[in-house]
Image (spheres, rainbow, N blue to C red):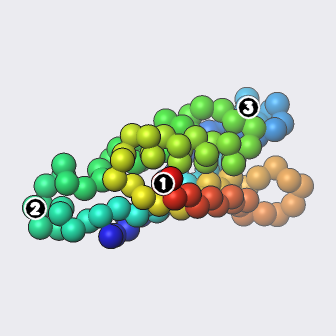
């Protein structure tokens, strides 16, 4: 087994429960870690034998572009899509952070983290 991590994927998205969040948007950070078997690709040196991190990034960016009220909802969509499109992924740890959230305080970020295993 092995791990692939995409750290600090930055997006400008429109998530949040407040109506104005859907209009003005915010900066977000996504951190993704997947578990997969890297033994074959380590021997063959072929992209087809591993998980393409370009595809992982594309899934994150595309799902972050779809408005959600809750970070948990967008995170669930990302996880579901990765499991659906990439059968070799066995575990996902995903953190979605809203930077400078509008919560009436000096808070750098609010983050939700989800961990799921393939059934």
Q: Nearer the viewer, mark 3 or mark 2?
A: 2
In percent of the image, x 89 and y 55: which residue is there?
104
Q: Position of residue 14 (x, y in %)?
A: 67, 36
Q: CA distance from mark 3 to mark 2?
A: 46 Å
Is any part of residue 32 visible from this angle? no
Residue lying furthest front: 119
Q: Residues within 10 Å of mark 1 (few under 14, many from 20)?
A: few
All told, the count of numbered labels is: 3
Residue 81 is situated, as x and y percent measured from the top left of the image, at 48, 40
Choose the circle earlier in sequence order: 2 or 1.
2
- As helix, strand or loop, the secondary structure at mark 1 comes to loop
Depth order, front residue of 53/86: 86
Q: Is residue 10 left or right of residue 37?
A: right
- Residue tagged by mark 3? 22
Give the position of the N terminus as an image quadrant.
bottom left
Quickly name the residue at label 2. Answer: 44
- Across and down, in percent, residue 46 comes to 13, 55
Label 1: which residue? 118
- Residue placed at 35% from the left, 62% from the top? 36
Looking at marks 3 and 1 on the same chain, the residue that comes earlier in the sequence is marked by 3
Q: Is residue 78 left or right of residue 111?
A: left
Instruction: Left or right? Give the position of 98 relative to 32.
Output: right
Above-or-below relation of 43 to 103 = below
Residue farthest along the left direction in this orientation: 44
Looking at the picture, tell me which residue is in the foreground, 81 or 12.
81
Q: Which mark is residue 82?
A: none
Where disc 2 sits, the SS reads helix
Q: Residue at x 68, y 58 (%)?
A: 112
Q: Quadrant of residue 21?
A: top right
């Amino acid at each position: 087994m092995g791990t692939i991590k995409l750290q600090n994927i930055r997006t400008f998205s429109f998530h949040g429960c407040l109506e104005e969040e859907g209009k003005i948007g915010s900066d977000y950070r996504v951190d993704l870690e997947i578990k997969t078997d890297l033994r074959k690709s380590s021997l063959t040196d072929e992209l087809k034998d591993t998980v393409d991190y370009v595809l992982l990034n594309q899934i994150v960016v595309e799902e972050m572009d779809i408005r959600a009220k809750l970070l948990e909802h967008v995170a669930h969509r990302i996880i579901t899509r990765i499991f659906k499109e990439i059968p070799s992924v066995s575990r996902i740890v995903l953190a979605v952070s809203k930077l400078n959230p509008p919560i009436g305080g000096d808070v750098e970020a609010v983050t939700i983290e989800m961990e799921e295993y393939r059934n």
